Image (cartoon, rainbow, N blue to C red):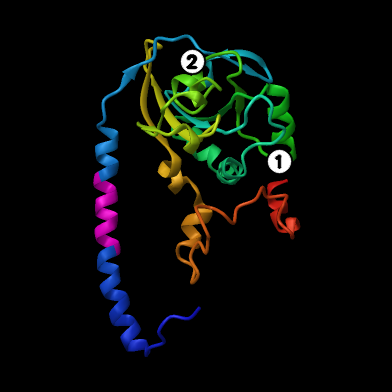
Amino acid sequence: MQNAVVSREEWLETRRAFLAKEKAHTRQRDALRAERQALPWVKVDKNYVFDTPDGKKSLADLFEGRSQLMIYHFMMGPEWEAGCPGCSFLSDHIDGTLPHLNNHDVTWVAVSRAPVEKIEAYKKRMGWKFPWVSSAGNDFNFDYHVSFTPEDLKKDKVFYNFTEMKPEDANDELPGMSAFYKNEKGEIFHTYSNYARGGEEVLGTLMILDYAPKGRNEDSTMSFVKRHDEYEDAKTQSCCH
């Protein structure tokens, strides 16, 4: 692979023209962000109780005294021994953000249907510190359309990413991210969710690759991704341990 090779002057002229498009994209992203912040909310009336290493906790407890909660719907089903490689890839980016998020009144928690013992074992393997709880005893994953029963997958269609899709295009577990707000009265509101590639900007590695000469260099979306201890030279990921 090699692109056209030009003089420095021609490169600068082309780069300036592209910079105008990048600036327009930034303004569009700012406008989209403002529109996202203005979306309506839905009050959460259901009492969800999660299994955690410290015992049972309600959805309100997961806020840890803050007013904003980001939940990552981590694909790890009840029978799984390891988490989804793609969800693991995203989660590799989280620990370093926690002090900044917490200081900005935001708590990050991963939620999976796997039992808490399996979650803790996999979390230890990956060297992660972020909070991760089990929804095995409640309907949270089903209510937020990231888990599907065998009966669901036998239907004509399942609901994911705000649309109906064929069951053969779905799995029993799918990824997503949801935001919640808790007011001074203790009322909780669901403010936002995204699914599929919706949370891609959280993946800083992809954002860096987008600047690299070969870009993502993938056969399909994130086809190159493995768990960080499964690469041939896993020692280069030692920062995560």
Above or below residue 204? Residue 136 is above
Q: Specify the principal SS of the magenta part.
A: helix
Magenta residues (range)? 22-31
- Residue 128 locus on image (x, y percent): 66, 38
Kindly identify the amino acid type of the residue bearing the numbered disc 2. Ala
Residue 102 horizontal side relative to residue 112, left or right: left
Q: Amino acid at mark 1?
A: Gly
- Left or right for 46, reference 50: left
- The residue nearer to you, when weighing 112 against 27, is 112
Give neighbour class at mark 2: few <14, some 14-19, many 20+ (Cα, 10 Å): many
The question of residue 28 being in magenta is answered with: yes
Q: Are marks 2 and 1 in contact (CB under 8 Å)?
A: no
Q: Quadrant of residue 236?
A: bottom right
Number of marks present in the image shown: 2
Q: Is residue 63 visible?
A: no
In the picture provided, is 51 more to the left or to the right than 157? right
Residue at which label 2 appears: 60
**Measured from the top left, where is residue 92 in percent x and y?**
60, 45
In the image, is residue 215 above or below residue 26? Answer: below
Q: Quadrant of residue 125?
A: top right
Question: Callout 1: 10 Å neighbours few (<14), some, many (20+)?
Answer: some
Badge 1 element = loop
Q: What's the distance in space between the residues labelled 2 and 1, CA to CA?
A: 27 Å
In the image, residue 116 lies in the stretch drawn in magenta: no
Question: Visible in this render: residue 67?
Answer: yes
Residue on which disc 1 sits: 127
Q: Image point 30% across, 79% down: which residue?
A: 14
8 relative to 210, above or below: below
Name the disc covering residue 170, or none: none
Seen in the picture, residue 25 relative to 7 is either above or below; the reply is above
Residue at 39% over, 14% down: 44
